[in-house]
Image (cartoon, helix red, strand yellow):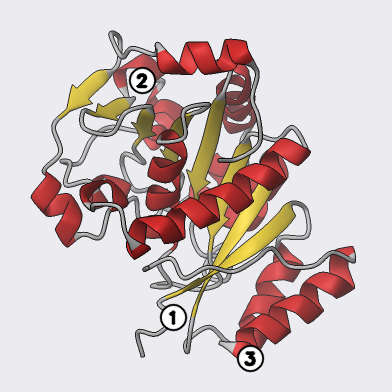
Amino acid sequence: MERIKQALERARAERQGQPVAAVVNAESPGGPSSTTAEALVENVTYSQTRQLEVSATELRAKRVVSAFAPGAFTDAYKMLRTQVLQRLNENSWNVLAVTSPGKGEGKSLTALNLAISMAMEISHTVLLVDANLRNPSLHEHLGLPGEPGLSDYLLQNVPLSDLFVHPKSIDHLTLLPGGTALHNSAEMLNSPKMSRLVEELKSRYAGRIVIFDLPPVLNAADAMAFAPYVDATLLVVEDGKTKRKEIEHALDLLSATNVIGTVLNKAGAH
């Protein structure tokens, strides 16, 4: 753990002259919003969005935070939520990407649990977008069937209104699934149509935070190509697995965005 912290601190200090955001173990209220935004969030309905049942038992088995009673596990995500929301609010940002240097480091589960924790904060609604178009998997974490999604919008012009999903038991959260897996995912994420979509999602609703789950930085060009479209990025690293050189290389490739901090995942699991 100490090795990873030191590497990140040095790398971030060299690039931006800023300290790394506090790290929490992701296996274990942000700033103020306007009264109007809070009222809109509190009264949100999903009359035009597909609503699907999700199994609490399956969510718990997949370590999705909404299925757990308050405790250390949920508190860890509340701490992460607070830190991230503070950074977003300080800069009037509302579009966040979540990625990792390599595969299997827990970025998708972290993105999902962070999105749910943010959705539980009364000032916000959250749209979680599966932008890992090479291997879309967020629907699996929720126990949902494979659905048309982002790739179908980009390639087939399927209306967004047909693609959004609201898990019934998770208030204020909407999912845009990844859809059909793509081989040319980097090109699609860097397309003008995708750029226009990000701007539309960013500004459509007051009080909304948009979170994009991106592929690992070092395995494909996707995250690097998409980085300029988001306000900030959160980097997930795995304790005992992610190497210092991988972190530094990932930070170099993400230089076009604001890396606001890291999540040290699976700490204590080794």
User: Residue at horizontal 52%, vertical 69%?
Assistant: 219
Residue 173 screen position, x and y as percent? 37, 31
Amino acid type for the residue under numbered disc 1? Ala
Q: Is residue 47 left or right of residue 258?
A: left
- Nearer mark to the viewer, of 2 and 3: 3
Between the C-alphas of marks 2 and 3, the distance is: 46 Å
Q: Which residue is mark 2?
A: 158
Residues at marks 2 and 1 touching, judged by CB atoms closer than 8 Å: no
Query: Does residue 133 sit above or below 250 in this rendering?
Result: above
Query: Does residue 145 sit above or below 158 in this rendering?
Result: below
Between the C-alphas of marks 3 and 1, the distance is: 13 Å
Q: Which residue is mark 3?
A: 3
For marks 2 and 1, the one nearer the N-term is: 2
Residue 115 screen position, x and y as percent? 43, 43
Q: Which residue is mark 1?
A: 267
When asked about the image quadrant of residue 48, the answer is top left
Nearer-the-camera pick, 245 or 182: 245
User: Residue at horizontal 32%, vertical 28%?
Assistant: 171
